[in-house]
């Protein structure tokens, strides 16, 4: 198989890249080269900024692919460019959308690919929906061979999956746990969530590549495991060997007191209970199974981060905000109890 990935070094795509190269795929990666030092051997790198359409057009002028996948398209204009570049040059074009595009709030917590797409809380998700609409229009009107993939919360060894964290990633929450400081969990922590290890996601994705039955289809790829946020944070604390000191805060309050977009990332995503029905994926990829349980994957991630100081990015601003939110809640309790 001959494939081109636009991106190829992110959380989702890096595992796919690794597995494809191990399988002997002729893989091309088109990116700016910022993270290519960690690439496994065998990839053909086309170093360019995908937004420089003329340059990219020159690089791929003599190339045709079985699969082209764009991991870094976030708005319709990006797909319009991809269509111009790759129409007639690939047998399949895979767009990485998002499970956050599904109806929010959900009318039924069980999600299938037939669940409506609607998210009034998060612009990111609405842009992904608009991208899907554009691509399906091209499929219906011109036969452009589209497959849409919807990941949910996918993680790897470089970042611990959390509901509430700062702009610099997960480390500051881990540091708070290690110091026995209180950690914020949104809501009451009982909503259900699905975490998928990127190596499991890669197996499902590769099974869709070159799959004629996936053309014109939308498919989500997730684990079948659902946990509460209280369980997820408990697993993280257990992997660190500490007791969890949790403070539950409403998503509405978190959004109102932060400069971050918690309206989108919580109201429009993580604050909702979700259970994914992966029947469609398993019909298309019969041997797919998500083999890494959350407790197993998080233990691997914690070990990796603790042994790699470069991943321990401190976030003093987020740490101070957590203390302020928790202090405000304690003061509110005192006022009510006077």
Image (cartoon, rainbow, N blue to C red):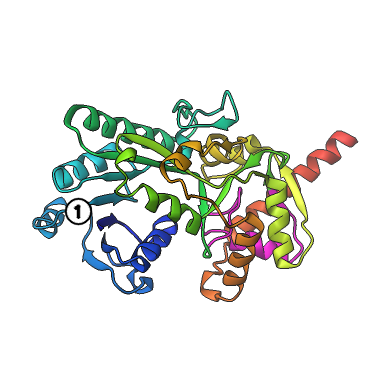
Look at the image and give the residue range highlighted in magenta: 159-184
Q: Main secondary structure of the magenta part?
A: loop
Q: Which residue lies furthest to the top in this view?
A: 107
Which quadrant would residue 20 be assigned to in this image? bottom left
Q: Viewer-proximal residue, 297 or 273?
A: 297
Residue drawn 35% across the image and 70% down it: 39
Give the x, y percent position of residue 287.
47, 50
Q: What element carries label 1?
A: loop
The quadrant in which the C terminus is found is: top right
In the drawing, does residue 17 fall left or right of residue 289?
left
User: In the image, is residue 174 part of the stretch drawn in magenta?
Assistant: yes
In the drawing, does residue 104 fall left or right of residue 71?
right
Residue drawn 25% across the image and 28% down it: 137
Residue 262 visible within the image: no
The quadrant in which the N terminus is found is: bottom left
Q: Residues within 10 Å of mark 1 (few under 14, many from 20)?
A: many
Give the x, y percent position of residue 31.
27, 61
Q: Which residue lies furthest to the right in this view?
A: 338
Give the x, y percent position of residue 292.
58, 57
Q: Viewer-proximal residue, 178 or 38?
A: 38
Dot 1 corresponds to which residue? 65
Q: Viewer-proximal residue, 200 or 266?
A: 200
Give the x, y percent position of residue 23.
35, 65
What is the count of numbered marks? 1
Which quadrant would residue 177 be assigned to in this image? bottom right
Residue 327 visible within the image: yes
């Amino acid at each position: 198989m001959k494939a081109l990935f636009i991106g190829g070094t992110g959380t989702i795509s890096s595992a796919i890249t690794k597995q494809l190269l191990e399988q002997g795929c002729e893989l091309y990666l088109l990116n700016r080269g910022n993270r290519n030092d960690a690439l496994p051997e065998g990839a053909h790198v086309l170093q360019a900024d995908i937004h420089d359409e003329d340059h990219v057009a020159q690089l791929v002028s003599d190339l045709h692919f079985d699969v082209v996948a764009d991991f870094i398209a976030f708005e319709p204009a990006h797909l319009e460019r991809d269509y111009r570049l790759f129409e007639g040059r690939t047998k399949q074009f895979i767009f990485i959308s998002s499970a956050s595009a599904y109806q929010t709030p959900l009318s039924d917590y069980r999600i299938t690919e037939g669940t409506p797409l609607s998210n009034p809380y998060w612009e990111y998700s609405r842009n992904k929906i608009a991208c899907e609409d554009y691509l399906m229009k091209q499929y219906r009107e011109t036969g452009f061979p589209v497959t849409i993939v919807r990941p949910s919360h996918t993680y790897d060894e470089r970042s611990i999956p959390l509901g509430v964290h700062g702009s610099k990633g997960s480390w500051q929450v881990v540091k708070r746990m290690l110091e026995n400081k209180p950690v914020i969990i949104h809501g009451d922590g009982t909503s259900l969530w699905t975490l998928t290890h990127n190596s499991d996601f890669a197996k499902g994705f590769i099974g869709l590549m070159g799959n004629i039955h996936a053309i014109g289809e939308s498919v989500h790829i997730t684990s079948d495991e659902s946990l509460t946020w209280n369980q997820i944070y408990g697993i993280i604390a257990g992997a660190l060997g500490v007791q969890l000191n949790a403070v539950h805060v409403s998503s509405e309050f978190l959004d109102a007191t932060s400069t971050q977009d918690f309206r989108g990332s919580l109201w429009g995503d993580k604050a909702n209970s979700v259970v994914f029905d992966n029947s469609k994926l398993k019909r298309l990829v019969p041997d797919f199974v998500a083999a890494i349980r959350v407790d197993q994957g998080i233990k691997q991630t914690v070990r990796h981060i603790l042994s790699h100081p470069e991943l321990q990015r401190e976030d003093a601003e987020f740490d101070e905000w957590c203390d302020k939110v928790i202090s405000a809640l304690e003061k509110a309790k005192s006022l009510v109890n006077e």
